[in-house]
Image (spheres, rainbow, N blue to C red):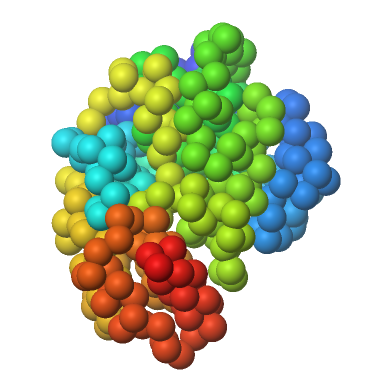
């Protein structure tokens, strides 16, 4: 086993390498995830995950990272800021004929970008080991595996354990220097790296701005979200009919929702992203609802290529837009657009189009 000073230096080198690769922050945790697995199990037992059955699968691997990737002894957690400049989020939310897309989804899909960089980080760690005889002797076979919002990984819990921030009342990981407008990624490694101190200070205090701002009142307690009422769940994860009582509350939000972040006092410290890939594409930051609703499936697939929006699918895209058009001020153009799809050959689309038309009667 190498000396503790050598492992400490390796951990510092890893953080430096992560910064050089463009990550905004980097921390290291062990594989004991504290209270986070128990919290997840309690949340699942309450049924607050809705149709996201995948969250209830492989709980043993969520609890114990070494069961997901054999040999894991530490987890490198990274942050990558995504807030694009001048997205005019508040302005778009206040423009009922415009489509609001969650700010994280305006640009290219983050999954491949982060995994590619984590793979590069793993290569550089391996090279560091190869170039250090004491490390090479202790770790002749270095192994790692990269994740970002994928597989049974408690990424926010891991990031909190790695000292990157606290989990706020809106269930987001928040850091004092950057708010919550960032992606997370993890590199499971077979190295006994010294762990950083967990971020234990809760800086939310008495603030409840996120709870008050939630359009559908999806927060049932501090740090407890009923996903079944969350607009992000309704517009992205849910594949069936959106509950009628929630539709009027969704406004013009067609993919995700940022309200709980927009009102968070800590997000005023959030830097804009340095990643051009996260800048808006296809004018999605300020598109008219009717224009997006008029996309045929080929146009949808073309314009969402390489975008996280693609995963929602064209049917849900039309469903979400129909709800937003139902919430928009009545106009002849909206009624004509809805009527053009009232006989669309899918029952989900038909149902939501008819609901929207009824709102304009």
* Foreground residue among 151 and 214: 214
* Left or right of 207, for residue 264: left
From the top left corner, tell me how far across and down residue 116 is, in percent. Answer: 35, 52
Q: Position of residue 205 (x, y in %)?
A: 56, 9
Q: Is residue 217 left or right of residue 249?
A: right
| Placement of 172 over or under 361, stated as above or below | above
**Residue 351, position as x, y percentages in the image:** 52, 76
Q: Which residue does the image show at 56% across and 52% down from the upper left?
A: 246
Closer to us: 60 or 257: 257
- Which image quarter holds the C terminus? bottom left
| Viewer-proximal residue among 197 and 55 | 55
* Residue 98 in sight in this render: yes
Q: Residue at x 80, y 44 (%)?
A: 46
Question: How many labels sit on residues?
Answer: 0
Left/right of residue 190 with respect to residue 252 in the rendered view: right
Residue that extends furthest to the front in the rendered view of this protein: 361
At x 26% / y 77%, what residue is drawn?
336
Q: Where residue 142 sits: x, y (%)?
A: 54, 44
Which quadrant is the N terminus positioned in? Answer: top right
Q: Where is 286 relative to 28, above or below? A: below
Which residue is painted at 55% across and 42% down in the image?
A: 216
Q: Can see residue 142?
A: no
């Amino acid at each position: 086993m190498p000396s503790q000073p050598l492992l400490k230096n390796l951990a510092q080198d890893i953080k430096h390498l992560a910064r050089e690769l463009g990550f905004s922050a980097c921390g290291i945790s062990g594989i004991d995830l504290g209270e986070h697995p128990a919290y997840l199990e309690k949340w699942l037992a309450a049924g607050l995950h809705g149709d996201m059955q995948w969250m209830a699968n492989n709980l043993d691997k969520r609890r114990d990272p070494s069961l997901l990737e054999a040999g894991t002894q530490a987890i490198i957690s990274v942050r990558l800021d995504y807030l694009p400049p001048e997205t005019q989020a508040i302005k778009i939310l206040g423009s009922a004929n415009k489509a609001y897309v969650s700010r994280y989804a305006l640009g290219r899909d983050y999954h491949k970008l982060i995994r590619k960089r984590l793979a590069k980080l793993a290569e550089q760690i391996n090279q560091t080991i190869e170039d250090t005889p004491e490390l090479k002797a202790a770790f002749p076979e270095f192994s790692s595996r990269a994740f970002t919002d994928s597989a049974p990984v408690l990424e926010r819990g891991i990031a909190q354990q790695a000292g990157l921030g606290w989990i706020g009342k809106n269930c987001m990981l928040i850091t004092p220097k950057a708010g919550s407008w960032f992606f997370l990624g993890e590199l499971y490694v077979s190295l006994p790296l010294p762990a950083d101190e967990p971020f234990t200070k809760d800086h939310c205090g008495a603030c409840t701005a996120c709870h008050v701002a939630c359009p559908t009142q999806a927060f049932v307690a501090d740090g407890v979200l009923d996903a079944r009422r969350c607009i992000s769940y309704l517009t992205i994860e849910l594949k069936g009919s959106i509950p009628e009582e929630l539709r009027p509350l969704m406004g013009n939000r067609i993919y995700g929702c940022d309200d709980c972040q927009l009102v968070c006092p800590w997000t005023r410290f959030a830097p804009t992203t340095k990643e051009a890939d996260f800048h808006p594409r296809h004018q999605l930051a300020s598109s008219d609802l009717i224009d997006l609703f008029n996309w045929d499936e080929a146009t949808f697939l073309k314009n969402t290529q390489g975008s996280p929006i693609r995963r929602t699918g064209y049917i849900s895209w039309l469903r979400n837009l129909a709800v937003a058009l139902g919430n928009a001020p009545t106009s002849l153009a909206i009624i004509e657009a809805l009527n053009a799809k009232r006989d669309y050959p899918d029952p989900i689309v038909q149902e939501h189009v008819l609901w929207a038309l009824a709102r304009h009667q």
